[in-house]
Image: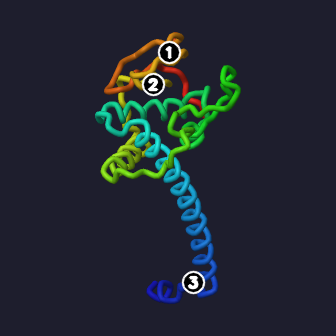
Amino acid sequence: MYNFFLSFEPSRRRLKGVCILLSVATLAMLLSYCVELKHSNEEILCLALNIYHEGRGEPFAGRLGIATVTMNRVASKKFPNNVCQVVFQRRYHRKHGFYVGEFSWTQDQISDTPKHDASWTDAINLARNVYRNNLLNHDVKNALFYHATYIQPGWANRMHKITTIGQHAFYQNYGTVSNKPEKK
């Protein structure tokens, strides 16, 4: 019996083959993870930029509301299913005859490089929590739109106002169902 255990040694060639297979599988898994991580980091950066430019100076609930609207758009069938595509989405404005950004900071010809270190750090931390931990502002859980309270866009008259937080009013379409299916 002891002889059996002592004599049972897999060949080195077989072990080498197993190690190579494990290495290839591990490498593929790591590459997949890195691609996913790169993708999620890009989306977090886009979300952080939107929070920073749209909500700098707003209370936490307002910045979280801005992030929630951005993520609601990603989940909606009416908008792209990627944070960066939602943030930088453009639409043709018939009245003006040119394309406009959905978020004003994406079209204002001012540098998009964050300058306020504390605000930028807060935006990145909030974006990570929203993106990775699904942290949302439930007061605006159905909102797909918002605007600064010091302007009155024409589209606001066609929407249902949910609430105002800080300097932003949040809206949803009339008839929005709160439990709509997410797009795949």
Kindly identify the amino acid type of the residue bearing the numbered disc 3.
Answer: Pro
Residue receiving disc 3 = 10
* Tag 1: amino acid: Ala
Q: Quadrant of the C terminus?
A: top right
Which residue position holds label 2?
147
CA separation, marks 1 and 2? 9 Å
Instruction: Give the x, y percent position of residue 41.
Output: 49, 53
145 with respect to 168 (left or right): right
Query: What residue is at 55 percent from the left and 52 percent from the top?
Result: 39
Residue 23 vertical placement versus 106 (above, below): below
State which mark lies toward you, 3 or 2: 2
Closer to the camera in the image, 72 or 151: 151
- Counting residues from the N terminus, which is met first, the one under dot 3 or under dot 2? 3
N-term mark: 1 or 2: 2
- In the image, what residue occupies the spot 49% across and 34% down? 70
Residue 48 sits in which quadrant? Answer: top left
| Separation (CA) of disc 3 from disc 2 | 69 Å
- Front one among 46 and 106: 106
Residues marked 1 and 2 touching at CB (< 8 Å): yes
Residue 113: % across, % down: 47, 52
Of label 1 and label 3, which has the lower sequence position? 3
Circle 2 SS class? strand
Q: Which is more toward the observer, 69 or 35?
A: 69
Q: Which residue is disc 1 drawn over?
A: 156
**Which residue: 36% across, 18% down?**
163
